[in-house]
């Protein structure tokens, strides 16, 4: 397993390809991992929100992570999504992923049961004590209905194998406070494509991206431009990619991104309920944006932008 203490750059929150009958499409998943790596992505994140993890069984989550880990073949780190609102179940998942050999875990705040800040702290502390794997916390209040506050992140940053946070609160002030208060070694990643530039300018180390499903080379280029303080190039790429970042959330994710990937010939457009296919007008918008970015002609995503 690779060391994650210096993890930075752009990682893809991978979709989970399904066959038309709803089963996992292993071939498409392996091919998609190869596409991501060939396009220069820095790391892979299976079984997160974009991977529809909440509609995967325990065994299916394990299967997806195994397939991604095998397909990656150690070329890039695999940071597996191990989250949920039942701490005991998350610990079981974390230990299983550790046995597979992944490099780290991404763990979302518990949803639905709305724990207080002490509950969040104790939840993540218990997970960290149950595994030796490095853990990246995941704060996404629009999905979970709970916001992990800076005080809690700072407390958790003192636990040795909690190495970072994916911040998707959308609150730049909160993110800035976290970056200011945590140890310099603590990794803060953007969980929102559209705020990567300001987050890295504040001291963040990268992005866990949805748009990199469709455009891994371009999103990686944006992230690297930010990390290298090449702000003119970063702003140029950000302007060009903003329509893709926004259209991916015009309906509930991962609906639009899976529709886009189907247009690109990467997967079958298949979901599990309660996610349903996107509307025809959304597909029209996706097709226009993908075409403008040069992603519908079988070209590398480096050929445009």
Image (cartoon, grey):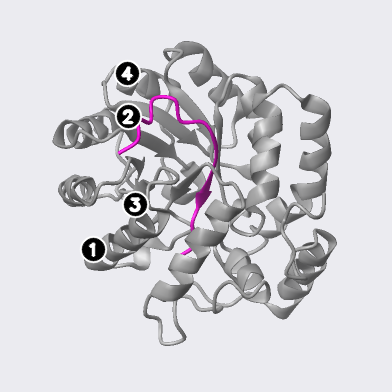
Q: Earlier in the sequence, mark 3 or mark 4?
A: 3
Element class at badge 2: helix
- Residue beneath disc 1: 58
16 in the magenta segment: yes
Sort mark 4 into few (<14), some (14-19) or many (20+) by Cα contacts within 10 Å: few
Measured Cα–Cα span from mark 4 to mark 2: 11 Å
- Residue beneath disc 2: 117
Give x and y (percent) for residue 202.
63, 19
Magenta residues, start to end? 1-17
247 in the magenta segment: no
Sort mark 1 into few (<14), some (14-19) or many (20+) by Cα contacts within 10 Å: some
Of marks 1 and 2, the one in the foreground: 1
Measured Cα–Cα span from mark 3 to mark 4: 23 Å
Of marks 4 and 1, the one in the foreground: 1
Residue at 82% from the left image edge and 47% from the top image edge: 240
- Residue beneath disc 4: 155
């Amino acid at each position: 397993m690779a060391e994650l203490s210096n993890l930075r750059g752009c990682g893809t929150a991978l979709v989970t390809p399904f066959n038309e009958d709803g089963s996992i499409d292993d071939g498409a998943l392996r091919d998609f991992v190869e596409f991501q790596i060939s396009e220069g992505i820095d790391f892979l994140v299976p079984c997160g929100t974009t991977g529809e993890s909440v509609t995967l069984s325990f065994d299916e989550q394990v299967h997806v992570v195994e397939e991604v880990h095998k397909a990656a073949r150690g070329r890039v780190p695999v940071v597996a999504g191990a989250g949920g609102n039942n701490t005991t179940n998350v610990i079981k998942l974390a230990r299983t992923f550790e046995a597979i050999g992944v490099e780290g875990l991404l763990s979302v705040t518990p949803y639905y049961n709305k724990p207080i800040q002490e509950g969040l702290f104790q939840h993540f502390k218990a997970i960290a004590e149950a595994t030796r794997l490095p853990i990246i916390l995941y704060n996404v209040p629009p999905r979970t209905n709970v916001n992990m506050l800076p005080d809690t992140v700072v407390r958790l940053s003192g636990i040795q194998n909690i190495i970072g946070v994916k911040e998707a609160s959308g609150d730049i002030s909160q993110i800035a406070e976290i970056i200011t208060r945590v140890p310099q070694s603590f990794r803060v990643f953007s969980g929102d494509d559209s705020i990567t530039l300001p987050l890295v300018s504040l001291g963040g180390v990268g992005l866990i991206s949805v748009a990199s499903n469709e455009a891994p080379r371009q999103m990686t280029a944006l992230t690297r431009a930010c990390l290298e303080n090449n702000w003119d190039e970063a702003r140029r790429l950000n302007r060009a990619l903003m329509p893709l970042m926004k259209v991916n959330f015009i309906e509930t994710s991962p609906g639009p991104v899976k529709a886009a990937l189907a247009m690109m010939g990467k997967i079958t457009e298949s979901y599990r309920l309660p996610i349903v296919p996107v509307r025809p007008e959304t597909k029209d918008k996706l097709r226009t944006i993908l075409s403008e970015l040069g992603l519908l002609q079988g070209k590398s995503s480096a050929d445009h932008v």
